[in-house]
Amino acid sequence: MEPTTFILFGATGDLAKRKIYPALFNLFVRGKLPQAFSVVGLGRREWTDEVFQAAVERSLYQFSRTEPADKEKLNAFLEAFRYSVLDIGREEDYRKLLALVEAREQALKMPPNRLFYLSVGPEHFEPIADNIRASGLGSADGWKRLVIEKPFGHDLASARALNAKLSESFAEEEIFRIDHYLGKPVVQRLESLQQANPVIQALWTNRYIANVQITASESVGVEERAGYYDHVGAIRDMFQNHLLQLLMMAAIHLPYDSSSEKVRFKKKKIMEALVPVAQEDVGQQVVRGQYTAGSIGGQPVEGYKSEPGIAADSMNDTFIAARLLIDNNDWRGVPFYIRTGKRMNKKSTRIVVEFKEPLKQAWSQSEDGVAPNLLVIEIGPGESIALRLNTKEAGAQGGFKPIHIDLHSTPADSPEAYENLIGDALKGDPTFFAHWDEVELSWQYVQPMLDAFAENAVPLRSYAAGSRGPAESDALLAEDGYHWWFDEESEALPKNESKEGANYAYHANH
Ligand SMILES: NC(=O)C1=CN([C@@H]2O[C@H](COP(=O)(O)OP(=O)(O)OC[C@H]3O[C@@H](n4cnc5c(N)ncnc54)[C@H](OP(=O)(O)O)[C@@H]3O)[C@@H](O)[C@H]2O)C=CC1
Ligand SMILES: O=C1O[C@H](COP(=O)(O)O)[C@@H](O)[C@H](O)[C@H]1O
């Protein structure tokens, strides 16, 4: 890997300590950082290098999965970290930064390969990009990359404006837009699931698939982010980015020789084939909801409007369910159902592919227990991919029973999303970052929904905290003759006990 200077805006912030430093440390421990590697942290706080290194060290003890037990290793890691006080709007701070970066490059005999990581609020993205260009930080002989956190815009117009501005300083291939769902290990394995299993590849069409269900339910509420969340809602926070990315990843057909260009091209094609929903039709395809008081895990939970920092008359969505249609030869006629919500009964991110039931007529009149085949892709908190089939035991009197074939369990020590993504950005591999085309098409698809929500043209349904969302979300699928597959109904899929080395294991449920 090429020598790199990692320049971190927002080095004193929450994301840096919870995700970025632990990810860098894990990469270091796994030998996946460049041999010559230097970090320059930035913030307004008057920290010294020593204070910065101590803050990084604390964050590792608090948030890293890899305990920094080896003091020598830890010190070698921390030695790479320097700090510079920088106010984003102050030009002279960038000149000071350039001097520090160049001094470090000279001391470490590194070429000027610079990765700028923007772990700051979105209002800072444009001025930082401008100042990087104006100060000369970006016009060096090496390469430059811009890693940018979400949110990328607030709507279609603002996303376009932001992209136009960033493009003045960085080329598209230099911009790495983080969507941490693309860094999740199981999402990254979807590619090999198809490529390594011709069986799955052959079934990946409307001939065999009845519907696809993508769920990201959360039991947490707005936590400490009321100010942010009350302006974005579930639709901007999760649906426009993470869930549409999961849809793209689930719907693409990947060739054996898939390159980053091919993956992104195919994702773009899926977005282009999505059937647009006109503003006046949003209510037929989308259910929006907001939680009221309830209980989770036996504990009483307040309703959304009573959360600190939330307006008492807020009409913000904390839940969204939608039916999406893809108009291409592979997926015509297969509804993709997406739902996400805060304060639901449990944390679960999963894709369930429900297969058609060609045998239903033949069996279900006379036999109990025949259920559709399901491919269940557990993305979090457990990680697994399992196929549910029907079987009948020899000589058994009863009906059919489901069995599960575990296609791919993720080892317990699999990397976290940020580790995967930062590692990819350091390598310059953009496969699991959101290309501008995808981002723009996502906003384009979502914009009529935002407009309908803003006009309150779609009813805001209530659901009790701790429930599975509004009843209308179930009705959305019932209209098509389907229902959401919940854990309980997909019948005790293999639990996520440590299954290292247990790929392709066979589980029978009794
Ligand atoms: N926290 C999280 O879990 C997640 C965060 N994100 C995104 O990551 C980004 C950062 O979030 P988070 O770390 O939580 O935010 P914080 O509020 O915790 O940190 C903000 C950082 O920005 C710096 N900063 C703010 N204003 C200035 C300024 N004028 N000049 C220089 N530095 C400034 C602060 O440094 P100082 O105070 O020293 O000036 C601080 O380091 C946001 O875009 C957020 O949406 C995305 C996913 C999850
Ligand atoms: O980006 C976000 O994601 C989290 C959920 O992420 P996960 O990895 O825990 O599934 C969500 O809670 C947050 O509101 C959102 O901004």
Image (tube, rainbow, N blue to C red):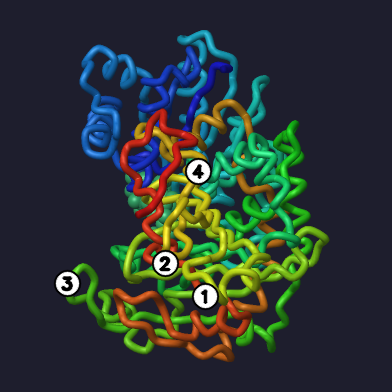
Residue at disc 1, secondary structure: loop
118 to 449, vertically: above or below = above
The mark that comes first in sequence, 4 or 2, is 4
- Give the image location of residue 312, x and y in percent: 32, 87
How packed mark 4 is, by other alpha carbons closer than 10 Å (few <14, some 14-19, many 20 or more), is many
Real-space CA distance between mark 1 and mark 2, rounded to the nearest whole angstrom:
10 Å
| Circle 4 residue | 186
Front position in the image: 316 or 97: 316
Front position in the image: 175 or 295: 295
The mark that comes first in sequence, 3 or 1, is 3
| Circle 2 residue | 489
- Left or right, residue 102 beside residue 324: left
| Circle 3 residue | 299
Front position in the image: 181 or 202: 202
Front position in the image: 335 or 27: 335
Real-space CA distance between mark 2 and mark 3, rounded to the nearest whole angstrom:
25 Å
| Circle 1 residue | 483
Residue at disc 3, secondary structure: strand
Amino acid type at circle 4 is Val
How packed mark 2 is, by other alpha carbons closer than 10 Å (few <14, some 14-19, many 20 or more), is few
- Give the image location of residue 208, x and y in percent: 70, 59
